[in-house]
Image (spheres, rainbow, N blue to C red):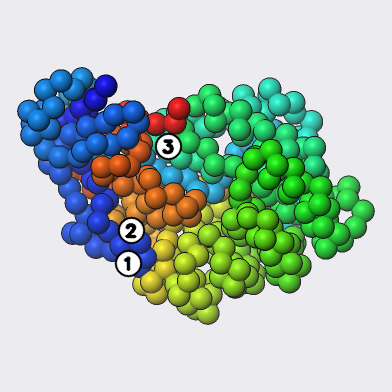
Amino acid sequence: MKKLIGPFKQILTLAGLALKGALKDDDMQIIPYGGVLVENGLIIAVDDFERLRKANSSAQIEEIEGDHVLLPGFVDCHTHICFAGSRAKDYAMRIQGKSYLDIAKAGGGIWDSVTQTRAADEALLTELLLQRVNRHLSEGVTTIEVKSGYGLETHSELKQLRVIAEASTQTKASLVPTCLAAHMVPKDFSGNQTEYLSYVFHDLLHVIKHDNLSNRIDIFIEESAFNPDTAAVYLNRAKLMGFDITIHADQFTTGGSAVAVKLGAVSADHLEASKDAEIKLLANSDTIAVVLPGASLGLGMQYAPARKLLDAGACLAIASDWNPGSAPMGDLLTQAAILSAAEKLNTAETFAGLTYRAAKALKFDDRGILAPGMRADMQAYNCNDYREILYQQGKMKPIKVWGSNK
Ligand code: NIG
Ligand code: FE
């Protein structure tokens, strides 16, 4: 059954914009008094509402009363929202000025979330994940990547990935699982980085492939986690098995983004420490540059050089990094709005980074733009001008969200 949704004061389709580089607001397609014709979760047409109504007299109408702006649903291509417990204690120490080392010594850091996530059963973890997923969905995020990485041994990593699969059957949001068993060498593993990655490769990756739990592999390349050379060996082996690669790169020190570009990773994420050389490498590659303003806000550190990345020609996506440690806020629109003010990203660049460019970081061509053939993942804001949305810096949330999962 076809459904016609509208009329909307403005539909911002984001169609026809470049995949890479800087954009201009004037290039955004805006359909005034528009409607969207939808069937089986897919968009059939986006056009003037009255024209669509006349041409589709048998379609069911979902009438939108008042002035609204319609956007594609946001794609959050980097989260860690499958976890148990809270790290409020870490945050309190951080804002007291305590160092990463002090926090780790007091029992905080990633290891604390690992301990709590290992202890949680699948039912509890599914409930906690769904609460976060559905909050994100209500805030306009219709596709959400979710990483494992708080298990750090075979059984618990698989538990996290199974929980993500189960949660995706219970929500209108589309979930994309990624294996981040290479988040850090767990404290209870008696071996070095190479040995841990070899264990992950032999004990875990084959099961993930066999059980079809994920086709994406992430690794944290950083002085406190894995070095670039060791990481490259693991990533190459995973690549040969058919996994797509994404990398936590250049968060505190450089090294990760060069590995990402060299190995053809789909994305390099963080980039707060990237300098001109890394920016150039990313801009001249097909690797999506994913910036995570929520981590900068959570850690009180500088933003990634988003403006420079765009000006150099990179494909820039903006994600939340929602996690219990460095990015507890999880409000993607607020974070993107704050980043846009700090880095001088215009509306087109900011919305592109939250939609079709972020979709590319997950290798999706079927979302992030409102056009025929695309998924009907959409969100409506109660305002009469699209510029109100970033102007309100995330305070205004969508009044209605359409997610087409299931
Ligand atoms: O993306 N950088 C590494 N991992 C996460 C932090 C995870 C945590 O602190 O629990 C990040 O910021
Ligand atoms: Fe992260």
Q: Amino acid at mark 2?
A: Glu
Residue 62 visible, this orientation: yes
Residue at (63%, 55%) from the top-left corner?
242
Residue 68 visible, this orientation: no
- Decide which of tag 1 and tag 2 comes sooner along the chain: 1
- Decide which of tag 1 and tag 3 comes sooner along the chain: 1
| Quadrant containing the C terminus in the rendered view | top left
**Is the residue under label 2 in contact with that under label 1 (CB below 8 Å)?**
yes
Residue holding disc 2 = 349
Badge 3 density bin: few <14, some 14–19, many ≥20, Cα 10 Å: many
Q: Secondary structure under badge 1?
A: loop
Residue at (60%, 58%) from the top-left corner?
245
Residue holding disc 1 = 22
Q: Amino acid at mark 1?
A: Ala
Q: Quadrant of residue 18?
A: bottom left
| Quadrant containing the N terminus in the rendered view | top left
**Is the residue under label 2 in contact with that under label 3 (CB below 8 Å)?**
no
- Disc 3 Cβ-to-ligand 2 distance below 8 Å: no
Q: CA distance from mark 3 to mark 2?
A: 19 Å
Q: CA distance from mark 1 to mark 3?
A: 25 Å
- Decide which of tag 3 and tag 2 comes sooner along the chain: 3
Q: Quadrant of residue 383?
A: top left
Q: In the image, which disc is placed on residue 142?
A: 3
Q: Position of residue 200 (x, y in %)?
A: 79, 51
Q: Is residue 237 left or right of residue 26?
A: right
* Nearer-the-camera pick, 222 or 168: 168
Nearer the observer: mark 3 or 2; the answer is: 3
